[in-house]
Amino acid sequence: MSKLDFWDQHRGIIKSSKGGWKIGRGIFNHDYEMMADLVGYKSYFQVMVLNATGRMIEKKQADWIEAVFICLSWPDPRIWCNQIGSLGGTLRSSVVASTSVGNMAGDSRLYGQKTLIAGAEFIQSALQEKKKGLTAAEIVAREAQKHRGKPNIVGYARPIAKGDERVVALERYAKELKLSEGEHLLLAREIDNVLLQQYDESINVNGYCCAIMSDFGFSPQETYRISTLLIAGGILACHTDAWQRPAESFYPLRCTDIDYQGPAPRPVPGKENN
Amino acid sequence: MQKTESRNENFSSRQSSKIWFEQPDSANPYIAVDHFCHGYNLIELMEKRSFVDVFFLLFNGKLPSSAQSELLQQLMIALINPGPRHPATRAGLNAAVGKTDSVHILPISLAVIGGAHLGAAEVEASMRFIKKNLRKPTAELAATLVSQDHSGDVDHHPAPGFGSRFSAIDIFQNKIAKHFVQLDAAGKHLQWGNSLADALAKKDMGWLSTGLAAATLLDLGFNAKQGAGIYQLLSAPGLLAHGQEYCSKPITAMPFVKDEDYFIERPEDEQA
């Protein structure tokens, strides 16, 4: 086989294992014809999970994921991703552009969609360790050892505030939906108890959601993919608020509001007199 | 459940900058009467220095030597256009021919060229790789890297910034590298990278554009975090030019793959 064969076999064509539009025949999405099988029968979140994973989940699972999106999208422009929406709004950047780029901010090590990868990896590997005999206290102790005695575990504790009201709301909704509790969530609760007793810290929305998504059977990458638009709602609200106010009036700065810490004014040297 | 309460973290009261100073107007402190880049008046920079010099100053805090300025200018030209076949360019073309707002063409292309395969994320990773391995003999390292590479991609990148493109050595990037190492400002990073590329050649691998950018930026004193964004920035002119070329063309000016060339690899395709 020539080195070029692989590339030539892909040239001039497109392959998809997801679906597509066959003009006059239908619009296919995995095992479904979208207009006949999905529209009016499945929720937007069921179809979004289908797009992300190729699997059709139960309606009540999709409803719970939708609630997670509500929890992770608040109209507060002080939140970093939301402020990008506000700054776009005040500069009259379009709502689509501002919301899209604000959503990109969630590819972060500190918050947002990308942290779900680490959160899901943690609870899934922790469960494997539990099955090998480790207790929740031993898992926490090992994590603390990695971080000079601080239990820096993605999904537990949170910046700016202690406690997490979103977990309370999602737990209530999960009960209403009669979602069954799996072994990841059970371990997450055990870790939460250890952290509360030993460190005065607790599970946050990432830890709680990653445990449930893992119980739903999603991999860390699938959890991340499903959450692509997780924070978009709050950014949209913040853009709209700034858009409806005078241009550039969102949180304006005087020159003197910048704490300049660089060199004092100096003459520019000519070439080779640097 | 723990009650939600503030940690009362000590946030800074003001934004800060070591880069830029705006001299406020005495009557309206929202308006600046002069701008200073690392202490140099921007108007004086406009009069005395080149764009490349001020670009270097902006990121490094000092003006470049003539040799550094020459190398950076040649890198800027080398990276000015990823070319019409590059996925990032084609993303912009899709926006342009689809009559997307023209202001979105460049951000769309730049997001795509941020990727970890032949994109800005690979530049950052390559800069870290080169710094970490700079003292290692390249022949042994190349053999180890190739034996440990199990990415599963058809084009292997046994180290970020080094590998094959379309199953072959990227001839043009290697040609540029051979030229760069002869310039006065070329240093240990470009030289080491060149040696690694030579060691990979028998496996049909060598420099990739991302590795070449990484080594050159390191020789110029840029750090890995800066490298990713600078790669995007230096690729931007070509991405934008190709996108703008399609802004006024009809939507039919780009191929739309025919149904017979579009393959849905699902059972329902056979049923439909």
Image: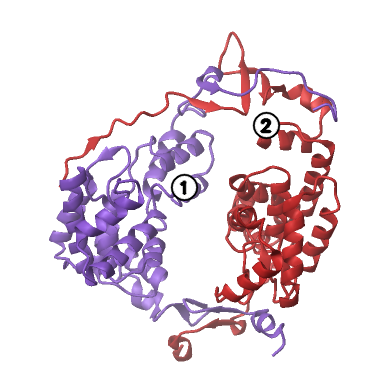
Chain colours: A purple, B red
From the viewer's perspective, tell me whether residue A266 is left or right of residue A223.
right
**Residue A70 % position (x, y):** 29, 51
Residue in the picture at 51% in, 81% down: A24
Q: Are marks 1 and 2 on the same chain?
A: no
> Mark 2 — residue?
B61
Dot 1 alpha-carbon crowd within 10 angstroms: few under 14, some 14 to 19, many 20 or more: some
Name the residue nearer the viewer: A91 or B185: B185
Name the residue nearer the viewer: A14 or B118: B118
Establish if B264 lies above or below A130.
Answer: below
Real-space Cα separation, disc 1 to disc 2, in angstroms: 27 Å
Q: Chain of mark 1?
A: A
Residue type of the residue flagged with mark 1: Ala
From the viewer's perspective, tell me whether residue A259 is left or right of residue A190.
right
Q: Quadrant of residue B96?
A: bottom right
> Mark 1 — residue?
A105
Dot label at residue B218? none
Q: Chain of mark 2?
A: B
Residue in the picture at 47% in, 40% down: A84
Residue type of the residue flagged with mark 2: Gly
**Residue A98 % position (x, y):** 50, 44
Name the residue nearer the viewer: A53 or B153: B153
Q: Quadrant of residue A245?
A: top left
Helix, strand or loop for disc 1 = loop
Q: Quadrant of residue B37?
A: top right
Name the residue nearer the viewer: A72 or B231: B231
Residue B117 visible in the picture:
yes
Residue in the picture at 15% in, 54% down: A172
